[in-house]
Image (cartoon, rainbow, N blue to C red):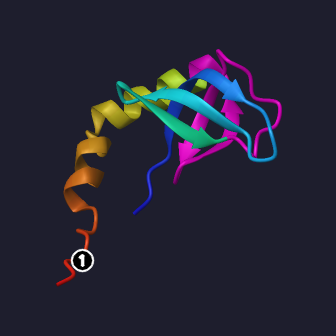
Amino acid sequence: MCLGIPAKVLEVTDGPLPSAVVEMAGQQRSVSAMYVPELQAGDWVFIQNGFAMNVLDEEDARQSLAAIDEYNLIAHVAENAPKPRRTS
Protein backbone atom coordinates (compact mmCIF):
# COMPACT_ATOMS: atom_id res chain seq x y z
CA MET A 1 0.00 0.00 0.00
CA CYS A 2 1.32 3.44 -0.90
CA LEU A 3 0.48 6.43 1.21
CA GLY A 4 0.94 9.95 -0.13
CA ILE A 5 1.82 12.51 2.52
CA PRO A 6 1.68 16.31 2.40
CA ALA A 7 5.02 18.00 3.05
CA LYS A 8 6.31 21.56 3.26
CA VAL A 9 9.03 22.52 0.79
CA LEU A 10 12.12 23.96 2.48
CA GLU A 11 14.46 24.22 -0.51
CA VAL A 12 14.35 23.62 -4.28
CA THR A 13 17.31 22.71 -6.50
CA ASP A 14 16.87 23.23 -10.25
CA GLY A 15 18.63 21.26 -12.95
CA PRO A 16 18.06 18.37 -15.30
CA LEU A 17 16.74 16.34 -12.33
CA PRO A 18 15.17 18.98 -10.04
CA SER A 19 14.85 18.06 -6.39
CA ALA A 20 13.53 19.54 -3.19
CA VAL A 21 14.16 19.23 0.52
CA VAL A 22 10.86 18.86 2.34
CA GLU A 23 9.71 18.50 5.92
CA MET A 24 7.49 15.45 6.20
CA ALA A 25 6.32 13.67 9.33
CA GLY A 26 8.84 15.62 11.42
CA GLN A 27 11.81 14.73 9.22
CA GLN A 28 13.65 16.45 6.38
CA ARG A 29 13.88 14.41 3.20
CA SER A 30 15.07 14.92 -0.33
CA VAL A 31 12.47 14.23 -3.03
CA SER A 32 12.31 14.49 -6.80
CA ALA A 33 10.60 17.64 -8.06
CA MET A 34 10.53 16.65 -11.73
CA TYR A 35 6.70 16.53 -11.88
CA VAL A 36 6.22 20.04 -10.44
CA PRO A 37 8.58 22.48 -12.19
CA GLU A 38 6.75 25.45 -10.64
CA LEU A 39 7.71 24.34 -7.11
CA GLN A 40 9.03 27.00 -4.71
CA ALA A 41 10.26 27.02 -1.12
CA GLY A 42 7.28 27.46 1.21
CA ASP A 43 4.88 25.47 -0.99
CA TRP A 44 3.05 22.43 0.28
CA VAL A 45 3.27 19.32 -1.92
CA PHE A 46 1.84 15.83 -2.00
CA ILE A 47 4.70 13.28 -1.75
CA GLN A 48 4.35 9.74 -3.01
CA ASN A 49 7.18 7.24 -3.52
CA GLY A 50 9.84 9.93 -3.23
CA PHE A 51 8.27 12.28 -5.79
CA ALA A 52 6.51 15.60 -5.29
CA MET A 53 3.33 14.88 -7.24
CA ASN A 54 1.45 18.19 -7.05
CA VAL A 55 1.31 21.48 -5.19
CA LEU A 56 -1.40 21.82 -2.51
CA ASP A 57 -2.78 24.83 -0.75
CA GLU A 58 -1.92 24.96 2.93
CA GLU A 59 -5.48 24.29 4.14
CA ASP A 60 -5.78 21.09 2.04
CA ALA A 61 -2.38 19.94 3.31
CA ARG A 62 -3.36 20.54 6.94
CA GLN A 63 -6.68 18.69 6.51
CA SER A 64 -4.88 15.72 4.95
CA LEU A 65 -2.32 15.67 7.76
CA ALA A 66 -5.12 15.80 10.34
CA ALA A 67 -6.82 12.78 8.72
CA ILE A 68 -3.51 10.87 8.56
CA ASP A 69 -2.97 11.61 12.25
CA GLU A 70 -6.56 10.77 13.24
CA TYR A 71 -6.38 7.33 11.64
CA ASN A 72 -2.73 6.76 12.62
CA LEU A 73 -1.92 5.91 8.99
CA ILE A 74 1.82 6.54 9.09
CA ALA A 75 2.36 4.00 11.87
CA HIS A 76 -0.03 1.56 10.16
CA VAL A 77 1.89 1.72 6.87
CA ALA A 78 5.24 1.32 8.63
CA GLU A 79 3.99 -1.72 10.55
CA ASN A 80 2.58 -3.40 7.45
CA ALA A 81 5.31 -2.53 4.94
CA PRO A 82 7.00 -5.47 3.23
CA LYS A 83 10.18 -6.47 5.02
CA PRO A 84 13.43 -6.54 3.01
CA ARG A 85 14.59 -9.94 1.87
CA ARG A 86 17.64 -11.40 3.50
CA THR A 87 20.44 -12.44 1.18
CA SER A 88 23.02 -14.95 2.27
Q: Which secondary structure lies at badge 1?
A: loop
**Farthest residue, direction top:** 42
Asked whether, in this view, residue 62 is left or right of residue 38, the answer is: left
**Does the magenta portion include 19?**
no
x, y percent for residue 67? 39, 33
Give amino acid for label 1. Answer: Arg
From the image, which quarter does the N terminus lie in?
Answer: bottom left
Can you identify the residue that label 1 sits on?
Answer: 85
- Which one is nearer the viewer's eye here, 76 or 42? 42
x, y percent for residue 65? 43, 29
- Which one is nearer the viewer's eye here, 84 or 76? 84
- Which one is nearer the viewer's eye here, 1 or 15? 15
The residue sitting at 24% across, 77% down in the picture is 85
Asked whether, in this view, residue 85 is left or right of residue 25, the answer is: left
Q: Magenta segment, which residues?
A: 33-59
The residue sitting at 53% across, 37% down in the picture is 30
The residue sitting at 69% across, 41% down in the picture is 33
Q: Quadrant of residue 83?
A: bottom left
From the image, which quarter does the C terminus lie in?
Answer: bottom left
**Does the magenta portion include 58?**
yes
**Farthest residue, direction bottom:** 88
- Which one is nearer the viewer's eye here, 39 or 12? 12
**Farthest residue, direction front:** 88
